[in-house]
Image (spheres, coloured by chain):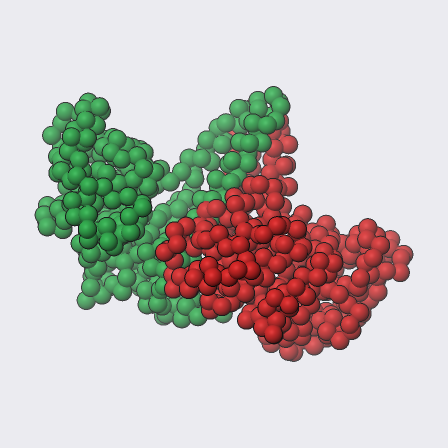
Chain colours: A green, B red
């Protein structure tokens, strides 16, 4: 399997991206990686990690797209950026199975949409992160920001794609699909969710379990949370923000307390570590961009080598499961 | 000051409602309360708490509106419910300064809108809870669910009303007002927030600081978070859900761990308690319904006596600060 990697996307590029890629080829016999970006810098990193194998190749690209760039114009003007060169390669060379980048979300989505293209029949591709939950499994949120002005039919496609992902890639039997709403009752919601509710109810290809509240997003009671990208973005980011807030409050509390409390914190270390592991996006991989013609994974912007490796593994699983083909045969024209 | 209380609203009515009301009249010389609901049951509760004073009166109402009722029809048909009778009293008897209920949010808002009425000039009244933040102060979220299909001008009114509340009631100087969005950059957002952003930028009566992400809702960096009710509801409930998730995970972790960890948790007790206090809505009061003709406070549905007392105090502060009059003179026709 051949994977194209944007070596200059994300806060920790290129070192952590190269590190994660080396782990991927070392631990997975069937993975070959092409790193796209400033060649000399990539060579330095490969040397830094002491990589001597032949499963990683390099394609040079001198420019870098950052979070400051406006996505649409950056994709059009920075034609020699690692992201655009990587996507061109992915588009034109059929040997490549998947693309992974930790770059700016807007640029990766815009780039993938323009270069790789939407599956005809899918109203809008959507960005879908996996979230941890209280059951110790994972919940897919779709969409978390690719579409901030959705029409009802978009959300129906999100539901179908999310269901296919959970079933094909994670092996969940009849994934439970819920609609993010302001209440659990059938009649709750705004104009959009009212219409989506009726449409989802009538679909026989998904296991629609009704409306859900944001309060239950981490309960593990459903497998797929369907949402407009605006509300989904608010959900995802407030979960992150709240978790960070609580962890910081506990840290500050321990820091400013006496020796007894500090000792207590040390004794509780294992519990905190388990919680941190459970909440840690680094174990989960990236967000998948569903509804485009090929496998595109957006790794976390602050991905380290371990996290980026998870995103590559996720791309690998997507390729093996044939999720894109299933979406094509379900929704494609 | 005379306050009407719906004695049969909320999960813990009437006991905790009566308990909170007794605390309010006992600790505040200037507060008199009229409890509305089943008279004999209320008398029993007053006896239970041993209240012998003359600052609490009772108005009988035999019916109860529950969370199962559909708000609009319940307000119209259950004319002898504690909520409707209380609102009629509040509407017709000018001696009453404020109304407090822990009942179903939908019913309280619909009832207040129908009986008390919107301030002419305010496009839509909004429900605004106070949230704790990392600075140890409070942040007002407006709207959290009263308006789930907002037009741009609604959010501008939310911003003005929220700013007046924070300034008049909590004494915040030039409250910082931010727009909930999917990114902090000026160009980020959906159609609604794009339009609202431009409108807020041009207002000279508020201190608009730009877009904010849900991630920063608890940072205390702003005083007022302006949002459509749908996204605001998602924000509020996902904060609650995430906090609960983390607390449960820690509890389960300690429960299933060895004696060392358990001892550690006991030694850290103070830190956990401080965090719990900081996060506790019971200390904050209720959500205020801004944009109606009089002071309406919606206490938390699971309010206990202490929490309900906070909501009464909040109503008192609102009356004293003249926040409704300021809103009338700023936005009223």
Q: Residue at x 63, y 32 (%)?
A: B269
Quadrant assignment, res A209: bottom left
Residue B128 placement, left or right of B149: right
Q: Residue furthest front?
A: B204
The residue nearer to you, when weighing A19 against B290, is B290
Locate residue B66, reporting x and y percent: 64, 66
Say which quadrant the N terminus of chain A sits in.
Answer: top left
Q: Residue at x 28, y 61 (%)?
A: A124
Residue A107 placement, left or right of B189: left
Q: Residue at x 56, y 60 (%)?
A: B205
Residue A139 drawn above or below residue A196: above
Residue B84 drawn above or below residue B252: below
Say which quadrant the C terminus of chain A sits in.
Answer: bottom left
Q: Residue furthest bottom?
A: B77
Locate residue A178, reporting x and y percent: 41, 59
The residue nearer to you, when weighing A262 against B284, is B284
Locate residue A314, reporting x and y percent: 27, 43
Residue A4 placement, left or right of A9: left
The residue nearer to you, when weighing A32 against B89, is B89
Q: Can residue A292 be seen in this snapshot?
A: no
Q: How many marks?
A: 0
Locate residue A148, reporting x and y percent: 36, 60
Q: Residue at x 84, y 65 (%)?
A: B57
The residue nearer to you, when weighing A156 against B169, is B169
Q: Can residue A238 be seen in this snapshot?
A: yes
Residue B301 placement, left or right of A314: right
């Amino acid at each position: 399997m051949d994977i194209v990697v944007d070596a200059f996307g994300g806060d920790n590029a290129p070192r952590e991206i190269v590190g994660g890629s080396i782990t991927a080829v070392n631990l997975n016999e069937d993975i070959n990686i092409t790193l796209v970006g400033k060649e000399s810098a990539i060579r330095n990193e490969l040397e830094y990690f002491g990589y001597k194998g032949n499963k990683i190749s390099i394609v040079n690209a001198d420019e870098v797209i950052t979070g400051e760039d406006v996505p649409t114009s950056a994709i059009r003007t920075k034609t020699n950026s690692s992201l655009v060169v990587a996507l061109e390669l992915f588009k034109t060379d059929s040997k490549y199975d998947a693309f992974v980048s930790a770059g700016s979300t807007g640029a990766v989505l815009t780039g993938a949409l323009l270069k790789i293209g939407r599956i005809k029949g899918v109203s809008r591709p959507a960005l879908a992160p996996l979230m941890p939950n209280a059951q110790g499994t994972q919940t897919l949120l779709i969409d978390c920001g690719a579409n901030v002005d959705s029409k009802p039919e978009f959300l129906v496609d999100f539901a179908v794609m999310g269901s296919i992902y959970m079933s094909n890639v994670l092996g969940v039997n009849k994934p439970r699909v819920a609609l993010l709403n302001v209440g659990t009752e059938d009649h709750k919601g705004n104009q959009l969710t009212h219409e989506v509710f009726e449409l989802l109810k009538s679909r026989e290809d998904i296991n629609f379990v009704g409306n859900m509240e944001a309060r239950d997003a981490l309960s593990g009671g459903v497998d797929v949370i369907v949402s407009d990208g605006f509300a989904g973005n608010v959900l995802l980011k407030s979960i992150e923000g709240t978790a960070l807030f609580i962890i910081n409050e506990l840290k500050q509390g321990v820091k400013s307390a006496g020796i007894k409390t500090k000792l207590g914190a040390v004794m509780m270390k294992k519990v905190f570590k388990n919680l941190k592991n459970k909440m840690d996006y680094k174990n989960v991989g990236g967000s998948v961009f569903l509804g485009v013609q090929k496998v595109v994974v957006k790794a976390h912007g602050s991905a380290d080598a371990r996290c980026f490796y998870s995103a590559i593994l996720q791309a690998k699983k997507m390729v093996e499961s044939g999720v894109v083909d299933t979406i094509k045969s379900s929704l494609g024209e």
